[in-house]
Image: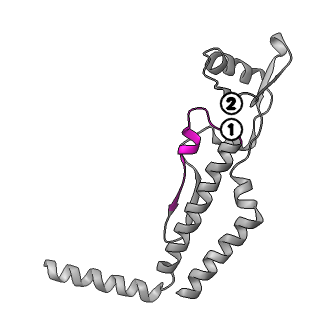
């Protein structure tokens, strides 16, 4: 197949796609707007809750748009779930915190009050209190209305 035929084939496939899915292009802009707005709000919520020490969690909060929709979240940060949901009190957590964070002096002022402890000696336990920033973003009535309005406007324009 020569280069001219290949270009024509690509054009025909694109035309067929637009004919089959005329609204997907219009929705892509809406997905972009939703992703940008909600990921920004998640970052603000995380910062207000003081969920940052070195900034990895906030810096990895982003979004991705595909033809099917938009994914918004904190990607590549294994401990994000502990901030969102908290942890259960455990002695193991206390040992980890002492050996990896508290003992090394790496807990910054902004993180103080996040780590809760009780007991003493072998009964000493620690946990991280929940500070949700993802669910409140999606569960707010304002944002749910924003999502519906943005999608509706995109579909009407299509």
Point out the stretch of residues depicted in magenta.
49-64
Q: Answer above or below: position of 51 versus 112.
A: below
**Mark 1–mark 2 distance (CA, rounded to whole Å):** 7 Å
Q: Does 108 lie within the magenta span?
A: no
Q: Nearer the viewer, residue 2 or 30?
A: 30
Query: Badge 1: how crowded within 10 Å, few (<14), some, or many (20+)?
Result: some
Q: Answer above or below: position of 39 versus 67.
A: above
Image quadrant containing the N terminus: bottom left
* Tag 2 residue: 111
**Picture quadrant of residue 83:** top right
- Residue lying furthest top: 121
At mark 1, the secondary structure is loop
User: x%, y% of residue 24?
Assistant: 50, 79
- Residue at image position (82%, 10%) is 121
- Residue lying furthest left: 2
The figure's colour scheme reads one colour
**Picture quadrant of residue 116:** top right
User: x%, y% of residue 14?
Assistant: 35, 82
* Tag 1 residue: 50
* Residue 29 visible at all: yes
At mark 2, the secondary structure is helix
- Residue at image position (38%, 87%) is 16
- Residue at image position (68%, 21%) is 97
Mark seen at residue 8: none
1 or 2: tag closer to the N-terminus: 1
Query: Badge 2: how crowded within 10 Å, few (<14), some, or many (20+)?
Result: some
Q: In this view, does 60 lie to the left or right of 49?
A: left
């Amino acid at each position: 197949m020569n280069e001219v035929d290949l270009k024509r084939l690509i054009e025909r496939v694109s035309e067929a796609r637009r004919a089959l899915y005329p609204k997907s292009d219009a929705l892509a802009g809406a997905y972009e707007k939703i992703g940008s707005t909600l990921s920004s709000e998640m970052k603000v919520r995380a910062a207000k809750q003081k969920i940052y020490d070195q900034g990895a969690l906030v810096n990895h909060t982003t979004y991705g748009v595909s033809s099917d929709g938009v994914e918004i979240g904190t990607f590549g940060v294994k401990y994000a779930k502990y901030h969102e949901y908290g942890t259960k009190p455990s002695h193991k957590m206390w040992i980890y915190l002492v050996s990896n964070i508290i003992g090394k002096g790496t807990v910054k002022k902004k993180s103080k009050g996040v780590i809760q402890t009780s007991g003493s000696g072998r009964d000493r336990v620690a946990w991280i209190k929940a500070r949700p920033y993802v669910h409140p973003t999606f569960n707010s009535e304002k944002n749910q209305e924003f999502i519906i309005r943005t999608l509706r406007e995109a579909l009407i324009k299509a």
